[in-house]
Image (spheres, rainbow, N blue to C red):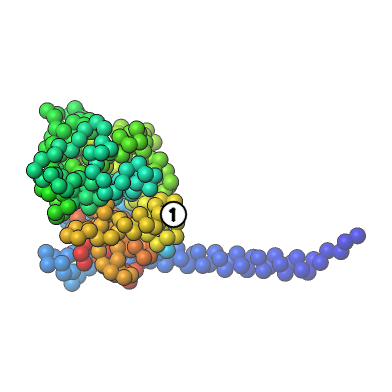
Amino acid sequence: MRRINFGFIVISLLTLACNSNKKNKIVDSTIGKELSIQSRIENNIYKIDENGKNDSIATTLESRMEALNVPGVSITVFDNNGILWSKGYGKKNKETGKDVNESTLFQAASISKPVASVAAFKLIEKNKFSLNENVNSKLKRWQVPDNQFTKIEKVTARRIMSHTSGLSTSGFQGYNKKDSIPTLLEIVQGSDITNSEPVRVVQKPGESELYSGGGMEVLQMLMEDVTGEAFPQLLNTLILDPTGMKNSSFAYPLPEKLDSLTANGYKENGKVVDGGYHIYPEKAAAGLWTNPTDLALFMLALGKSYRGEDHSLLSQESARTMMTRVPGAGGIGIGIDGDGDAFRFRHTGGNAGFVCYAVSFANKGRGAVIMTNSDNGFPLIHEIVRTISKEYNWPAMWMRE
């Protein structure tokens, strides 16, 4: 009969128990540290004046929300390629009294653009179209009208995503839920039910930066035409599903499981947007519903591609092309600031009743996403971002700081 060394077993079990206790203590210590930093952020917000200087006296996040008339805000902070914490504050719906939590959905507004741009780069990698070809060579349902500005230089995907295409229509108002909603074709060519101008070339392509949400709608049409897929499903396949953005959608109506999670948007005067929020059929420019946690997953995935750590979202070459400055403009599909360890990619968003900001350091897996349900959200987001940088001892994260 085999003899069993009970002494060895007891020692092994005790060793495993000690190691387990050590791991638990490390986890508890990490959670405690993050909660401490989170509390300091919530209680050390500094008002920023018009010259960009902090007030000398700190106040609370809650008091700044009240002073700026921002009903709700949601924050996600990430580092070391993972989420540190996510938390919601205030009300997602003042009328019902429902609170914002980490699952609450906001309109991402123009942060839809970098998400759509990464999807475009994925199609470029699949040779569906190229970055530098005339988009008219692949558009099927409509053509960008040629005029005196396009005799030599043409509208390309690179120029659309870097806002140097010369195309018009900087942004969109959205539509009331009771309105007739135009199709993509009606948006770009113009129609009686469209509340934006037709998308046309208004300056020489490649000449200088001219922010164009209309250009992103041309890109959306190009992506649909070369794949034969509707944009929401295409983005699910290319971006949302691979990155784990389970609570995000470009679809309208929203999937049933997401519809109950939406926040209402609020105007500058504190009144709710009619119907709770506007509908944005301009999906590539402004149509994404999401939350900060999901957007943080997107920013982390793009950063990993940039650093060559993971190619599942984009190749490193594509990600680095996106984050290379175009002369006289920003990156291709994303804004960029800083140098070295402070080099970061970012984008703002502003729809009716919603304002948001996403930023990540390109050479580190760290950054933050902040979303609000108010037209008054930008000053508050600036103050929160500055406080996060201070408490984590990170470089500046705001635009051009």
Q: Residue at x 21, y 67 (%)?
A: 401
- In the image, residue 301 sits, relative to residue 276, either above or below, namely below
Residue 115: % across, % down: 31, 48
Residue 270 seen from this side = no
Q: Quadrant of the N terminus?
A: bottom right
Q: Residue at x 64, y 65 (%)?
A: 17
Residue 347: % across, % down: 25, 54
Count of all numbered marks drawn on residues in the image: 1
Q: As rendered, which of 323 and 110 lies closer to the eye?
A: 323
- In the image, residue 274 sits, relative to residue 71, either above or below, namely above
Judge from the rendering whether residue 61 lies leftward or rightward of residue 294; answer left or right: left
- In the image, residue 359 sits, relative to residue 340, either above or below, namely above
Q: As rendered, which of 152 and 146 lies closer to the eye?
A: 152
Q: Secondary structure at mark 1?
A: loop
User: Which corner quadrant of the image does residue 360 belong to?
Assistant: bottom left
Residue 287: % across, % down: 26, 41
- In the image, residue 126 sits, relative to residue 259, either above or below, namely below
Where is mark 1, residue-wise?
Answer: 311
Judge from the rendering whether residue 328 lies leftward or rightward of residue 306; answer left or right: left
Q: Residue furthest front?
A: 152
Q: Kindly identify the amino acid type of the residue bearing the numbered disc 1.
A: His
Q: As rendered, which of 119 and 236 lies closer to the eye?
A: 119
Q: Residue at x 45, y 56 (%)?
A: 310
Q: Residue at x 22, y 61 (%)?
A: 399
